Image (cartoon, rainbow, N blue to C red):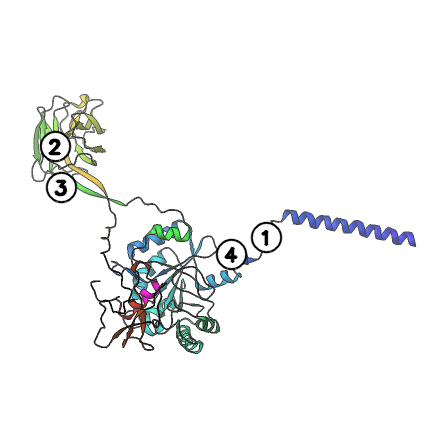
Amino acid sequence: MLKTKIRGMLQMNKMLKQVISILLAIAVLIPSGLFAPVTEAATSEIPVLLYHRIVDTATNEWTDTSVDKFKSTMKYLNDNGYNTLTADQYVNIKAGVEAAPAKPILLTFDDGTPGFVTKALPVLDQYDMNAVAFIVTGWIGKGYSMSQSQLQDLATNHPNISIQNHTVNHAEGVWKTMTKTEASAELAEANNYLKQITNKDPILLAPYGDFNSDVQAAAAANGIKYSFKVGYPNQGDHASGRYYVQMGTTLSDITNWIGGPAPDTTAPSTSVTVYHESFSNGKGVATQSGNANLTTVTNKVFAGNEDGTALYVSNRANDWDADDFDYSGMKLVNGKTYTVTASVYVDADIAMPSGAQAYLQSIDSYDVVASANYEAGKAITLSGKFIVDTSKNTKLRIQSNASGKEVSFYIGDLLITEQVTTEEPTREPALPFTTVTFEDQKAGGFVGRAGTETLTVSNEANHTDGGSYALKVEGRAMSKSRTIIMMNLSSRRNWEPLQVLQMIRSDQTLISPVKI
């Protein structure tokens, strides 16, 4: 009996060793990251871009991005494999419940302007991109923002656009001092409005860019998962950074922000006609070479000469009995590169010598720019590039090789073009300015508007290191809540974007021009 038990225990021990060996083998074969938590996908920051207005022609340096710049940026993101996120994707990835795609990025657009619908949305749809539209609910249908029907269409027909909370009034200078009760009331009002449009609870917030701990607590209490400010660094879930795209922002700036490959800086080019001769008004600048006769004719239609007018080159006995086109007559510039194209035709009844060719040459070096075999009754095209070097050449010549020296031919059209780069015009440098600090307790040339505003220099608030005073503006009619903003212009280059935006939003302009 004892022997039987011992034998059984030995067999079980052997089986246990086999099981352990199998498990160890499986552990070796399975990739180490297979069972890693999804949260690892969100360990690196997801870049967030902040846009305001997309317009045909940018004029406001703080809010405007031209359609052309926007298109080039979206094309860059598409061509380089970036994946734009919805609000839900962003939240899920940050929470670690969804794996991030390759090169994730969040595109955000503040204020819900009509240009988002008419200018930005077609480009986003073209590249199958997602984006977040932060909507100021109290602005809908009131001119600066889109209409109610446009907002509803976004929610109904464009699932790639996440409609999120940008407060009710977009009031400046209040979100830093709001109580939790005040902030919660406004956030709840905006949330309720947007939910009626989208049938979804907003989960992202941009409270003007200002915040305090009460505002952050109110956001969390109202179901907001992440709140955004202007600029970096990130300061927590309810002070997340965004890269602020302005009128002067370049594609290189954006690629540096998001860590992408350098963009192709080759300037786009277009073909510009420098000289075109159809011979419809005579010989133009053409002159005879050798003993050739030059005669303009009509009703000689062939490929490349649809109008039928042509220059007939006859009485040829030598290859140089031909047709010359002087550089100066065509206004070609020394050192430039041009493309020349000429259509040539030989009558169908001509007995073509073997090896006969048409030549397009630079004279006096006799470099061949282009050549082609003559074909009786068929049009041929001579086309090639050449560089004007007046120390070697002064003209172009259409002639033949020695085998074709007696062949008469027609020139139906001569076109010379140049590739010209098309670059964005450079803006003039900023005018000199004198710093206004308000530390002298003077308004510095600023005046109130509309007869209702009162300007005073106050030490109630200041946003500059070492400063004590700022300009206090009271009696502003546009804000429904508080009518006070605090401005400090101690250094134009160091203005906080947020403060500048606060001033812009009041009436879409910073201040009336003031010489400082």
Which secondary structure type mostly characterizes the magenta part of the structure?
A: helix
**Disc 2 marks which amino acid?**
Asp
Question: In the rendered structure, which disc, 4 or 1, sits on the residue that comes first in sequence?
Answer: 1
> Who is closer to the viewer here, 254 or 376?
254
Question: In the rendered structure, which disc, 3 or 2, sits on the residue that comes first in sequence?
Answer: 3
Horizontal side of 143 relative to 314 (left or right) equals right
Residue 69, percent from left and from top: 30, 54
Dot 4 corresponds to which residue? 43
Q: Is residue 396 above or below residue 21?
A: above
Quarter of the figure with residue 363:
top left
- The CA distance from mark 2 to mark 1 is 74 Å
State the residue lying farthest toward the right. Answer: 1
Residue 146 in view in this figure? no
Question: In the rendered structure, which disc, 2 or 1, sits on the residue that comes first in sequence?
Answer: 1
Report crowding for label 4: few under 14, some 14 to 19, many 20 or more residues within 10 A (C-alpha). Answer: few
Mark 2 or 4, which is nearer the eye? 4
- Tell me where the magenta segment starts and ends, as one range: 497-501
- The CA distance from mark 2 to mark 4 is 68 Å
User: In what element is the residue under mark 1?
Assistant: loop
Which label is found at residue 326? 2
User: In what element is the residue under mark 4?
Assistant: loop
Q: Is residue 422 above or below residue 49?
A: above
